[in-house]
Image (spheres, grey):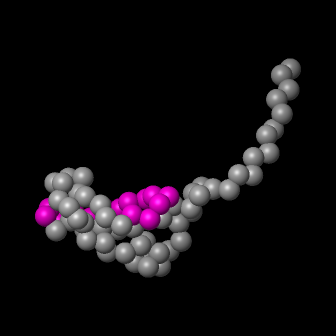
């Protein structure tokens, strides 16, 4: 029988910041989940720059997000 020890890993998980953006060129909504604060983003669909920040998911939906 193989005995394998259980590793106790209690490293802290970095919280992701979720923001919602709107492209004025092609009128799509894009969510960006990042560890860092995003100040400016370009549209992955049409390449339009800059996107309009609609807000964070916490402020838009009033919900909390967590990794499972």
**Residue 15 screen position, x and y as percent:** 56, 62
As rendered, which of 15 and 40 lies closer to the eye? Answer: 40
Q: Is residue 44 left or right of residue 9?
A: left
Quadrant location of the N terminus in the rendered image: top right
As rendered, which of 35 and 67 lies closer to the eye? Answer: 35
Identify the residue shown where x is 13% and y is 64%.
25
State how many labels appear. Answer: 0
Check the image and report above or below for 19 versus 44. below
Identify the residue shown where x is 63% and y is 56%.
13
Quarter where residue 22 is shown: bottom left
**Residue 7 screen position, x and y as percent:** 79, 40
Residue 24 falls inside the magenta stretch: no
Quadrant location of the C terminus in the rendered image: bottom right
Quarter where residue 4 is shown: top right
**Residue 67 screen position, x and y as percent:** 57, 57
**Residue 38 screen position, x and y as percent:** 39, 63
Tell which residue pokes out farthest to the left in this image: 25
Q: Is residue 51 left or right of residue 67?
A: left
Residue 35 falls inside the magenta stretch: yes
Tell which residue pokes out farthest to the front in this image: 39
Identify the residue shown where x is 37% and y is 75%.
55
Identify the residue shown where x is 59% and y is 58%.
14
Q: Is residue 14 left or right of residue 56?
A: right
**Residue range (magenta):** 25-38
């Amino acid at each position: 029988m193989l005995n394998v020890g259980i590793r106790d890993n209690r490293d802290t998980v970095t919280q992701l910041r979720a923001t919602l953006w709107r492209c004025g060129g092609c009128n799509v909504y894009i969510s960006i989940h990042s560890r860092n604060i995003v100040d400016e983003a370009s549209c992955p669909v049409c390449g339009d720059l800059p996107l309009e920040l609609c807000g964070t998911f916490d402020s838009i939906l009033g919900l909390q997000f967590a990794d499972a």
